[in-house]
Amino acid sequence: MINKLTDKIKKTNAPIVVGLDPMMKFVPGQVQKRAFEEYGETLEGAAEAIWQYNKEIVDNIYDIVPAVKPQIAMYEQFGIPGLMVFKKTVDYCKEKDLVVIGDVKRGDIGSTSEAYAAGHLGKVKVGNKTFSGFDEDFVTVNPYLGSDGVNPFIKVCKEEKKGIFVLVKTSNPSSGEFQDRPIADADGRPLYEVVGEKVAKWGEEHMGDSYSYVGAVVGATYPEMGKILRRIMPKNYILVPGYGAQGGSGKDLAHFFNEDGLGAIINSSRGIIAAWQQEKYASFGEEHFGEASRAAVEDMRKDIAQALDCR
């Protein structure tokens, strides 16, 4: 799957992943109205509104981006109906030949981690049959329980030819409370560097054609740290959240890429899916929110390309 992701980035010339992180405040009024008329103001009604919102956005961007990243919490908040829409969204995006990165941030040990890996990337046996659960192409994984929590995902990735992105340096402001702490037995280097070295090692042992199917998550909001981690993890794709709404811009991103122009994929969530609410794209109006999302992708693609050209 890492080979497919790389190929699609080359084909679209867009190292971009669209975060499908829907919240009801992003969903235009006419979409909510139709859903509530059919299902009422219920969890089912909210889930239907989210589904119709996602579908319209995907229909407008699937041909110009390589990947999407649905954040599972945004669906779980609506209970079982929300999880059904998460699965429906994953399946629809795969029908459109998009690479799907499940932002699930799972991390546990033993049989629990094995179950998460099976449910999101692998297969589960029921009697004499096997079934795929959510069936994403990649998922995000929290490594802070150690190798016990990551190895079951790597095992399933090897079997299914899928991939993971391991949290290394996250984009949120308080990430440094733990991730930046110096480690005594690592010559005082910060924890995120030690985790990056571990990701590089896992990656060396599980390679695609040019890049590993073990990637890393490193926030756009920390470009200097991104420079260091790019050197530490030369063969690992870096998933970079924090573009746009969280403050990252194209000029912050060049250091995340290798000299071949590959090796990184930049995430934007509400900057794209809620573009219609921004002054810049207000002319599209609520009725054309999907077209506003497409315009935001095009602008993001230009911003990244310009930053890479100026390296």
Image: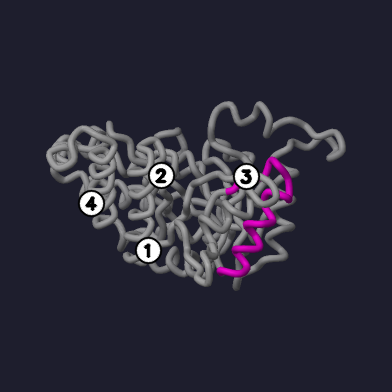
Classified by dominant secondary structure, the portion drawn in magenta counts as: helix
Disc 2 vs disc 4: Cβ atoms closer than 8 Å? Answer: no
Alpha-carbon neighbours of circle 1 within 10 Å: few (<14), some, or many (≥20)?
A: some
Q: Nearer the viewer, residue 198 or 234?
A: 198
Residue 268, label in figure: 2
Res 118 → quadrant:
bottom right
Which one is in front, 75 or 298? Answer: 75
Q: Please report the residue visible at 69 percent of the width from the left and 47 percent of the height from the top.
A: 109
Circle nearer the N terminus (1, 3): 1
The Cα atoms of the two marked residues, 1 and 2, are separated by 19 Å
| Disc on the earlier residue, 1 or 2 | 1
Q: Residue type at mark 1: give it.
A: Lys
Q: Is residue 102 left or right of residue 45?
A: right
Per the image, label 2 sits on a secondary structure element best described as strand
Residue underneath mark 3: 107
Residue 85 lies in the magenta stretch: no
Locate residue 105 relative to residue 91 in the image: left or right: right
Q: Which residue is mark 1?
A: 94
Q: Earlier in the sequence, mark 4 or mark 1?
A: 4
Question: Is-magenta flag for residue 149?
Answer: yes
Q: Position of residue 69 (x, y in %)?
A: 43, 50
Which numbered dot is residue 56? 4
User: Depth-wise, is mark 1 or mark 3 nearer the camera?
Assistant: 3
Mark 2 and mark 4 lie on one chain; the one further toward the N terminus is 4
Q: Start and end of the magenta stretch?
A: 141-160
